[in-house]
Image (tube, rainbow, N blue to C red):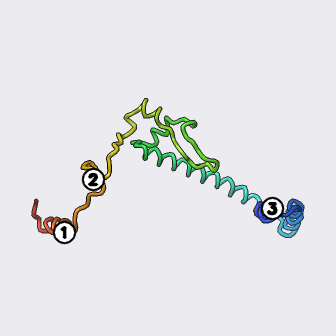
Amino acid sequence: MIWLKELLKEREDADELVKLIGSEVEKRYGMGARRSNEYEKEIAMLRGEIASVRKEHAIEKEIMAQGGRNAKAVRALMEENMVETDAEGRVVRIDLDKIKKSDPYLFKEIKNVMEGSPQDKSSRRKSERNVFFESARRAAGIKG
């Protein structure tokens, strides 16, 4: 009957109405009302599990973003105080400096490259003409 409480939350006599309607539903539908309460509890439990899985995924994603080679290995070394969450339980920040110092082999070296510099190869693209000629050479079996 959580849904009913939510609908009637603005009214002053909400608790009385919920009890009255709940007893009437119990009389008419018997076990169905009890089952709906059980389902509501199960749904709440499953939502908690989903939130937990989302948090773990966000943590693993952040580990990989900070250069982690193996998220499970880094996660095993993490302590709960290293994860900072907001009021809704979403991951805000993860402090991995302690693990990076003690076990540097678990992390890739992240190079900060300026965009447009010769080291930045992310934006380099071959022209359509070059792509066409390369694919034609491969199809003809010509190297070079």
Front one among 104 and 10: 10
Q: Image check: 104 left or right of 4?
A: left
Q: Earlier in the sequence, mark 1 or mark 3?
A: 3
> Which residue in the protein does label 3 denote?
9
Q: What is the x, y in percent for residue 75? A: 49, 40
Q: What is the x, y in percent for residue 35? A: 76, 61
Quarter holding residue 68: top left
Q: Earlier in the sequence, mark 2 or mark 3?
A: 3
Distance CA(mark 1)–CA(mark 3) = 66 Å
The amino acid beneath tag 2 is Lys
Front one among 96 and 60: 96
Quadrant in the picture for the N terminus? bottom right
Mark 2 residue crowding within 10 angstroms, few (<14) / some (14–19) / many (20+): few
Mark 1 residue crowding within 10 angstroms, few (<14) / some (14–19) / many (20+): few
Quadrant in the picture for the C terminus? bottom left
SS label for mark 1: helix
> Which residue in the protein does label 1 denote?
129
Contact check, label 1 and label 2, Cβ < 8 Å: no
Contact check, label 1 and label 3, Cβ < 8 Å: no
